[in-house]
Image (cartoon, grey):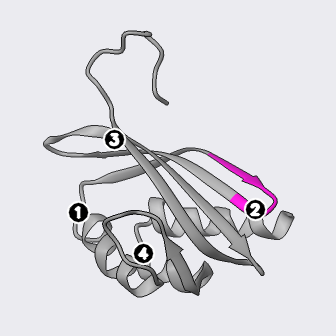
């Protein structure tokens, strides 16, 4: 599914790297977007409204893409979220495609500890 991979890479660049939330959603997210994050309702509008301040409103925040996986109708991005005055967070966003558009989203976030018992990095 080369089309999903290319589209997802463009979405990730717009959304995470350039922090252009609305443009990323307009580019690839379906109007029937299902949101599994318990803090946001379904639909692209509420996601744009809820996420824009975290991205556009935080000029010193960074969302560094560590890796992406695209397999069939599923795509995942692993991100290191950082900003002044707060610990880094490891983010795994999982998306489902249908007819070339993102129709569903799940996420898992974990604060990066100062020290790891396993001594393995999170990124």
Q: Which residue is drawn at the image coordinates 66% and 66% (left, top)?
A: 96
Q: Which residue is mark 2?
A: 5
- Magenta segment range? 68-74
| Residues at marks 2 and 3 touching, judged by CB atoms closer than 8 Å | no
Q: How many marks?
A: 4
| Residues at marks 4 and 2 touching, judged by CB atoms closer than 8 Å | no
Disc 3 to disc 4, how far (Cα)? Answer: 19 Å
Q: Secondary structure at mark 1?
A: loop
In magenta stretch: residue 5: no
**Main SS class of the magenta portion in the image:** strand
Disc 4 to disc 2, how far (Cα)? Answer: 19 Å
Q: Nearer the viewer, mark 3 or mark 4?
A: 3
The disc at residue 21 is 4
The disc at residue 89 is 3
Q: Which residue is mark 1?
A: 58
Q: Estimate the x, y position of residue 79 in percent, counting from the top left.
A: 47, 46
In the depicted structure, whether residue 84 falls above or below residue 56: above
Q: Is residue 66 left or right of residue 108?
A: right
In the depicted structure, whether residue 80 falls above or below residue 56: above
Q: Which residue is drawn at the image coordinates 24% and 71% (left, top)?
A: 53
Q: Estimate the x, y position of residue 117 in percent, counting from the top left.
A: 37, 10
Q: Residues within 10 Å of mark 2 (few under 14, many from 20)?
A: some
């Amino acid at each position: 599914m080369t089309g999903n991979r290319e589209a997802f890479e463009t979405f990730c660049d717009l959304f995470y790297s350039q922090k252009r939330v609305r443009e990323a959603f307009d580019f690839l997210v379906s109007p029937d977007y299902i949101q599994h994050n318990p803090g946001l309702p379904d639909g692209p509008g509420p996601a744009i409204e809820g996420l824009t301040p975290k991205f556009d409103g935080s000029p010193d925040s960074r969302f560094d893409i560590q890796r992406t996986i695209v397999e069939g109708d599923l795509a995942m991005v692993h991100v290191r979220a950082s900003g002044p005055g707060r610990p880094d967070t490891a983010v795994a966003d999982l998306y489902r495609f249908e007819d070339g558009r993102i129709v569903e989203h799940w996420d898992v976030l974990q604060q990066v500890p100062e020290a790891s018992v396993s001594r393995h990095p999170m990124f």
